[in-house]
Image (spheres, helix red, strand yellow):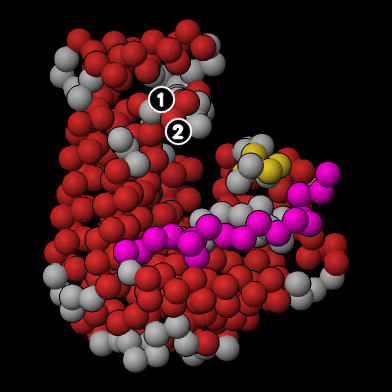
Amino acid sequence: MTHGTTYQPSPAGHVDLGDAELNERIATGMTEVEVLLREELAKGEDFLVDKVTHLLTAGGKRFRPMMALLASQYGPRAGSRDVVKAAAALETVHLATLYHDDVMDEAELRRGVDSANARWDNAVAILAGDILFAHASRLMSELDTHTVGHFATTFQDLVTGQMRETLGAGDRDPIEHYLDVIAEKTGVLIASSGYLGAYHAGASAEHTDALRKIGMSVGMIFQIVDDIIDIFSDPEQSGKTPGTDLREGVFTLPVLLALAEDSDVGEQLRGLLTGPLTEDADVERALELLGRSQGREQALAHVHRFLAEVETQIARLPESPATDALRLLAGYTVRRVG
């Protein structure tokens, strides 16, 4: 069975944002983004096209385009063709980073299908990611030089975050290191979505800045919540195997906070978590110790700090269905923890 042939419509256009008219506007924009993505990624040799559309057709939330379209509601050109192009470019960059991330992580699955590196090989996956950056560059070139410059900075941040994660914390505080990595790897592209959606809709500088900062905080919340779910979720509810990061030797915020505890649990964890956990019994013991630690509560305190920043920035925006929707989205990201 070839995974690239069936089209699964993105669920993002069907998210209930709390207002029927807004839902319709965003859904229309999401359809336009999807059409443009398929048109753009179909350009090139056949042997390239099936590789670069592999993850596109596998689905995905399309959260970044949705954020851009939502941010565009604050300008007179909400949902305009330029907004759609910026949204498509953002999703294309996101797709490219997934191809490269899967090579770095030696991942076998992505979005429920074989990762590109597992289906073909690392070289093909890297080149597919590279060609996606070319597509994103072409879309940006049809906008303006300000957008190209903004994306250059965003791309530099993305690579800096990946490099920072690869090299490790070194002598730095591991929690500060972790927060910098997720800001650069996850937060920055959602921040760009808020910024470029507002900018290309002609929103004011004040509102554009607020939407950029909201995007950054929402990205931070998303990642920390994901990391909490990886450790503390019920697999039947989350569909995830708890402790995946522990098996890979990746210590996320709740684990780092637990490791820093001046307690018997913290001491036992420091003795156990010295690298990847290869034995199921060790993973079970680590999860049990983490459950007794303050790691979950302290990680949630960070989540609520970023949620408070979202509220601070939302206060800079006019009250509207779009503003209510931003509150809804931020709240949803937190509620995923249960």
Is residue 171 visible in the rendered image? The answer is no
Q: How many marks?
A: 2
Q: Which residues are magenta?
A: 1-18
Report the predominant secondary structure element of the magenta stretch. loop
| Mark seen at residue 238 | 2
> What's the amino acid at mark 2?
Ser
From this view, report whether residue 99 is shown above or below residue 311. above
Q: Is residue 245 magenta?
A: no
Name the residue tied to disc 1.
234
Q: Secondary structure at mark 1?
A: loop
> What's the amino acid at mark 1?
Asp
Q: CA gap, disc 1 to disc 2?
A: 6 Å
- Residue drawn at x 24%, y 16% is 292
| Mark seen at residue 23 | none
In this view, the residue in front, 241 or 249, is 241
Q: Residues within 10 Å of mark 1 (few under 14, many from 20)?
A: some
In this view, the residue in front, 306 or 335, is 335
From this view, report whether residue 84 is shown above or below residue 250. below
Residue 80 position in % (x across, y down): 47, 87
Residue 99 position in % (x across, y down): 63, 52
